[in-house]
């Protein structure tokens, strides 16, 4: 699968140039014209790297970068800041906000590609690191990716946390209340019934293509991850 790069830039000509060069080098590309759109795309498309312009309408690139770092699902997402400013102070601020690298405009496409590859190399977790496995399901925590039998599974943030918790305790039965505490947190008021809704979504996502159901419902007790049928 081609690595996916999200370009966050409001200048159309620059987006066209970046897209052309990235696609030529074998990357897949998605775009966002402002910070809000960028955060949405990150949650939905789960890019492998973000090229983030500093000067954006509404929310600045710096603020977008901070929000990327604050959200658990994007904490380790590689970010390269693009900017026209070259002063040392700005550079430090960019890196302080959590960017992995910083490129000053104008830059050559080959420089950009080289820096991008370097950042991606550094971000890739070591083999066997941060991957949970259960039956034919693999969950890469750093990349926030789930596969079943090698096929990608798309989960919402709650289903992801729910599956992560179940995969950390395979075979154990948890009541709805326990799952609420562990997955949603103690301070959040959520109806126990909500757990059923998210379990249903998780099942649906995991069991595409008529694979065996890995989520066991234990009547009046709760749920467990279980491969024995
Ligand atoms: Ca801009």
Image: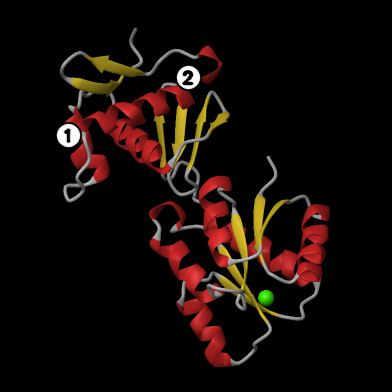
Q: Is residue 161 left or right of residue 129?
A: left
Q: Dot 1, how many residues are within 10 Å of its Cα: few (below 14), some (14-19), or many (20+)?
A: some
**Residue 74, placed above or below residue 134:** below
Sequence-first disc among 2 and 1: 1
Q: Residue at x 53, y 62 (%)?
A: 36
Numbered circle sitting on residue 207: 2
Quadrant into which the C terminus falls? top left
Can you tell me which quadrant of the image ligand 1 is in?
A: bottom right
Q: Is residue 27 left or right of residue 147?
A: right
Q: Secondary structure at mark 2?
A: loop
**Residue 49, placed above or below residue 149:** below
Please tell me in which quadrant of the rendered image residue 11 appears.
bottom right
According to the picture, the residue beneath numbered tag 1 turns out to be 178
Q: Dot 2, how many residues are within 10 Å of its Cα: few (below 14), some (14-19), or many (20+)?
A: some
Q: Residue at x 49, y 14 (%)?
A: 211
Q: Is mark 2 within 8 Å of ligand 1?
A: no
Q: Is residue 214 left or right of residue 9?
A: left
Please tell me in which quadrant of the rendered image residue 88 appears.
bottom right
**Residue 164, placed above or below residue 29:** above
Residue 134 visible from this viewpoint: no
Q: Secondary structure at mark 1?
A: helix
Q: Residue at x 20, y 29 (%)?
A: 176
């Amino acid at each position: 699968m081609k690595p996916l790069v999200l370009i966050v830039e409001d200048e159309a000509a620059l987006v066209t140039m970046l897209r052309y060069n990235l696609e030529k080098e074998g990357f897949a590309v998605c775009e966002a014209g402002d910070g809000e759109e960028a955060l949405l795309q990150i949650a939905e498309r789960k890019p492998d790297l973000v090229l983030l312009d500093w000067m954006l309408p509404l929310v600045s690139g710096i603020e977008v970068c901070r929000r990327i770092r604050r959200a658990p699902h994007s904490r380790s997402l590689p970010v390269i800041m693009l900017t026209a400013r070259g002063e040392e102070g700005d550079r430090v601020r960019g890196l302080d906000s959590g960017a992995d690298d910083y490129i000053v405009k104008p830059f050559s496409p080959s420089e950009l590609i080289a820096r991008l590859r370097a950042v991606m190399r550094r971000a890739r977790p070591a083999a066997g690191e941060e991957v949970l496995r259960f039956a034919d399901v693999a969950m890469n925590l750093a990349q926030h990716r789930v596969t079943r039998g090698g096929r990608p599974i798309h989960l919402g943030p709650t289903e992801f946390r729910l599956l992560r918790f179940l995969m950390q305790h395979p075979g154990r039965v948890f009541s709805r209340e326990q799952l609420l505490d562990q997955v949603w947190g103690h301070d959040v008021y959520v109806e126990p019934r909500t757990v059923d809704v998210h379990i249903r979504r998780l099942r649906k996502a995991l069991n595409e293509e008529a694979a065996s159901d890995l989520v066991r419902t234990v009547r009046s007790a709760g749920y467990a991850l279980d491969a024995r049928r």
